Image (cartoon, rainbow, N blue to C red):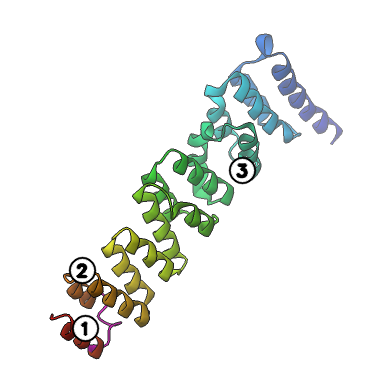
Amino acid sequence: CVFLQSHYDEYDNAVCTMMDHSPSSWRHDIFVQNILKVSNHDLYYRAMIFYLEEEPMLLNDLLKILSMKVDLPKAVSVMRKAGHLPLITPFLKSVQNQNVSAVNEALNEIYVENEDHESLKQSILEYDNFESLNLAQRLENHELLDFRRIAAIIYRKNKKYAKSIEISKKDELWKDAIETVSESNEMELAEQLLRFFMETGERELFASMLYTCYSLIKPDVAMEVAWRFGL
């Protein structure tokens, strides 16, 4: 055991020496060979800062090599505190299949800041381990329609159907609203949306509602609405 500890201390010392004397001692290939064998795992996170400051273009390569060793939430925290979280986007994407909340939330945050609604939508649909309602609240009043639509999707996934419908109605996303009602399986929501369409002049959606939500709209309600609005 003493021999093994001494052996591993050599790797720790080698890594520290390369970081402390980088102009003359550091080489990427030798560095990664040694850091994979260190006993002090805090050196992983010190190495992240070292690469951020001196070799930022190789930071993602380092992290991919350490992906099975680093604590992902801690790695995200280190980069967030350093103020350079977007720099490790490629690495975060490569480990997102582990569905770790810190990784999901970091990527979702980056997508929102970059106004990349397509990547954000794919992320929330494929990986569900994140504070979804917090994200929905952040997006529901976003200036871009696509992000408000994602908020409605998140509310629907969390069975907050009335809230999802409310957002879709504001943006006149009628298809989304009808599909949400259908998924909710709530007769009250179906009748409310049917009457809303008629009262706001969206008469052509009467047939769409009956077709998509046929099991949720009672025949007498359909007949009454049809008679009242001359349909």
Q: State whether residue 91 is above or below residue 156.
A: above
Residue occupying the far left of the picture:
230
Q: Earlier in the sequence, mark 3 or mark 1?
A: 3
- Camera-nearest label, 3 or 1: 1
Amino acid type assigned to the residue bearing label 1 in the image: Val
- Residue 223 in sight from this viewpoint: yes
Name the quadrant containing residue 40.
top right
Q: As drawn, is 171 to the left or to the right of 231?
A: right
The amino acid sitting under disc 3 is Leu
User: Which secondary structure class fits the magenta region best?
Assistant: loop
- CB atoms at circles 3 and 2 under 8 Å apart? no
Q: What residue appears at the point 32 percent right and 73 percent down from the top-left corner?
A: 182
Residue 2 spot, x, y in % from top left: 86, 33
> Which residue is depicted at the point 63% across and 38% down?
75
Disc 3 target residue: 72
Mark linked to residue 225 = 1
Q: Residue tagged by mark 2?
A: 202
Q: Percent x, y for residue 7?
A: 78, 28
Mark 3 is surrounded, within 10 Å at the Cα level, by few (under 14), some (14 to 19) or many (20 or more) other residues, namely some
Region in magenta: 212-219
